[in-house]
Amino acid sequence: IRRTKIVDVLQRTDYGAEVNVKGWVRTHRSSKVVDFIALNDGSTINNVQVVVDPATVDAELLKQVTTGACISATGKLVESQGQGQNSEIQCTDLQLLGACGSDYPMQKKGQTFEYMRQHAHLRLRTNTFGAVMRIRHNMAIAIHKYFHDHGFFYFHSPIITASDAEGAGEMFQVTTKKLDDLKKDENGKVNYSDDFFGKMTSLTVSGQLEGELGATALGQIYTFGPTFRAENSNTPRHLAEFWMIEPEMAFIDLDDLMDTEEDFIKYCVRWALDNCKDDLAFLNKMIDNTLIERLQGVVSEDFVRLDYTEGINILEEAVKAGKKFEFPVSWGMDLASEHERFLVEEHFKKPVIMTHYPKGIKAFYMKLDEDGRTVQGTDVLFPQIGEIIGGSVREESYDKLVAQIEERHIPMKDMWWYLDTRRFGTCPHGGFGLGFERLILFVTGMQNIRDVIPFPRTPKSAEF
Ligand code: 4AD
Ligand code: MG
């Protein structure tokens, strides 16, 4: 008899049929006359109940059916007497596939996330991580579906690159040599000519610049892959390795860009509401009982569109009215997460798309506004999260772009291939980057970004 996944078994109503399920034991309750085993195989948050007559099973075997053990159960599908589930299995053949030692770290229910992080190799077996990982999968599908349906092409930007797309100097270097073996020039600077790539290369911080090459040829593209930042930020919102979605579009302006950002993110949240009902219900019950309500709020309301300068005014007014921030507020500053969260959580109480930032705090590629002080950059700010999307209209003028590059002392010789887009048939274009894990944080209600990726990479934490 072939195995049936528990998600499918729980849908079935052909009572009397013989089925086989395999999975990991969540709980095992026994009495003299009957044993109840709650079994989960990861296909759904829901367990199937396996009912065993202890007289029919070897007592030693039944003793080994402990939390975490892997079993195979065959029996008759029957209508469940218990509440909240349709069917259970009246077991006629029970087999132990893998016993589980009593030192199983996930044995106890209700462990802290901190504790689970220390057992990252096994935490996937818990209900919460199962739910988060299924939602993560669903979000990836929603993203591909959205862009495919809107005529974007999935475009693969390189992981190893010679350019610092964000110009923030937060790159992990790639070399085949031990650093000590790299040649140094007379000033003691490392000379990479000897290395595999013949120059200094790094792991990508963003696929945007290559994405612009794609968009100025194919019209609309998106990337979706891992990106790396060697920033030493130990916060609940930062990872050293995170996944980013970066659409890039030719022939758009700032309003088109904001419309796409808003439509796309709403689509993803709606997808979760429609396709992850059981997992969301579980998280709503166990993690955050306002979760589903908040998700419904985001899909049904218009995001606020706010000029940076207006945003600073609002923050300054708040300070005058007695609001205390850790970092002082003034025009020209980069918003700290406390400022972003004040605007979305306390002032507007909905997502905000902030625009027209001072050029000094944004990357070189953003299109300069007429006033020469601000740029056509957008950040989408979300409740609980802060910045979830960063994007911009790109500077399409060769001369203005070169001026920005020179002002920032970015080595021009490294940028020739990028500048060529502006020399050969340049066009208005723009795009944005969505941090995948920040989206998952929002959709799951989880509090720490380390808990929405299977294997988080953060400063001083990469055990395997
Ligand atoms: O704002 P960022 O740095 O923008 C870019 O990389 C642009 N090239 C995007 C573009 O226009 N194509 O990053 C974009 C998003 C942020 O809004 C945030 O959601 C996420 O990526 N992000 C991080 N997520 C987790 N850990 C980190 N260290 C992150 N840094 C950025
Ligand atoms: Mg940003």
Image (cartoon, rainbow, N blue to C red):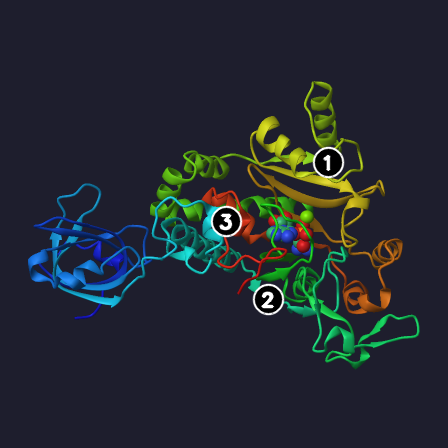
Q: Nearer the viewer, mark 3 or mark 1?
A: 3
Q: Earlier in the sequence, mark 2 or mark 1?
A: 2
* Depth check, front residue: 278 or 154: 278
Please report the residue visible at 66 percent of the width from the left and 48 percent of the height from the top.
390
Q: Which residue is mark 3?
A: 440
Q: CA distance from mark 2 to mark 3?
A: 22 Å
Which element type, helix, strand or loop, lies under badge 2?
loop
Q: CA distance from mark 3 to mark 1?
A: 26 Å
Q: Earlier in the sequence, mark 3 or mark 1?
A: 1
The disc labelled 1 sits on which kind of residue?
Answer: Tyr
Query: Badge 2 local density, few (<14 within 10 Å), some, or many (20+)?
Result: many
The disc labelled 2 sits on which kind of residue?
Answer: Phe
Q: Which residue is mark 2?
A: 155
Q: Position of residue 252 (x, y in %)?
A: 67, 51
* Depth check, front residue: 223 or 235: 235
Q: Position of residue 256 (x, y in %)?
A: 64, 47
Please report the residue visible at 69 percent of the width from the left and 62 percent of the height from the top.
212
Please report the residue visible at 67 percent of the width from the left and 58 percent of the height from the top.
229
Which element type, helix, strand or loop, lies under badge 3?
helix
Please report the residue visible at 65 percent of the width from the left and 38 percent of the height from the top.
337
Q: Is residue 432 visible?
A: no
Residue 463 relative to residue 92: left or right? right
| Quarter-of-image position of residue 462 | bottom right
Q: Position of residue 102 (x, y in %)?
A: 31, 57
